[in-house]
Image (cartoon, grey):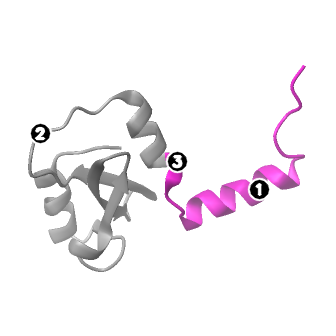
């Protein structure tokens, strides 16, 4: 999810989140010309992002979906393994 920078900074201070790669500078994710900072949400078991932009850029649903799907996490890996044990992705048709 894309959240406000202030919201995620507050969660980091409260210990409910942390920068994905240790620091804000190391956690920047580049995606189709957009820069975001990736933050691990410890309370929700997901990765959220906030815009790290010097100038305002327009976000669309496609870019936000790509950003969320491109990040690897322990939660995604474990859910993929669980789905694989159930037979994996259903066949089309």
Which residue is drawn at the image coordinates 29% and 66% (left, top)?
17
| Helix, strand or loop for disc 1 | helix
Residue depth check, mark 1 versus mark 2: number of the one nearer the observer:
2
Q: Residue furthest front?
A: 33
Alpha carbons under labels 1 and 3: distance apart: 18 Å
**Observer-nearest of 93 and 75:** 93
Seen in the picture, residue 41 relative to 90 is either above or below; the reply is below
In this rendering, position of residue 70 left or right of residue 34:
right
Residue 9 numbered tag: none
| Helix, strand or loop for disc 3 | helix
Q: How packed is label 2: few (under 14 Cα within 10 Å), some, or many (20 or more)? A: few
How far from the left and from the top, in percent, is residue 11? 21, 61
| Helix, strand or loop for disc 2 | loop
The first of marks 1 and 2 along the sequence is 2
Q: Residue furthest top?
A: 93
88 magenta-colored: yes
Residue depth check, mark 1 versus mark 3: number of the one nearer the observer:
3
The first of marks 1 and 3 along the sequence is 3
Q: Which residue is identified by label 3?
A: 69
The first of marks 2 and 3 along the sequence is 2
Which residue is drawn at the image coordinates 20% and 57% (left, top)?
8
Q: Which residue is identified by label 2?
A: 56
Q: Which residue is identified by label 1?
A: 82
Alpha carbons under labels 2 and 3: distance apart: 23 Å
Seen in the picture, residue 21 relative to 36 is either above or below; the reply is below
Which stretch did the figure color magenta?
A: 69-93
Alpha carbons under labels 1 and 2: distance apart: 40 Å
How far from the left and from the top, in percent, is residue 81? 76, 60
Seen in the picture, residue 15 relative to 30 is either above or below; the reply is below
Q: How packed is label 3: few (under 14 Cα within 10 Å), some, or many (20 or more)? A: few
How far from the left and from the top, in percent, is residue 55? 9, 45
């Amino acid at each position: 999810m894309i959240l406000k920078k202030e919201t995620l900074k507050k969660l980091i201070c409260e210990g409910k989140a942390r920068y994905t790669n240790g620091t804000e500078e190391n956690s920047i994710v580049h995606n189709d010309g957009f820069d975001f900072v990736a933050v691990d949400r410890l309370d929700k078991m997901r990765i959220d992002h906030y815009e790290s932009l010097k100038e305002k850029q327009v976000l669309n649903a496609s870019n936000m979906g790509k950003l969320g799907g491109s990040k690897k996490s322990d939660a995604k890996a474990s859910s993929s393994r669980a789905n694989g044990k159930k037979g994996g992705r259903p066949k089309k048709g």
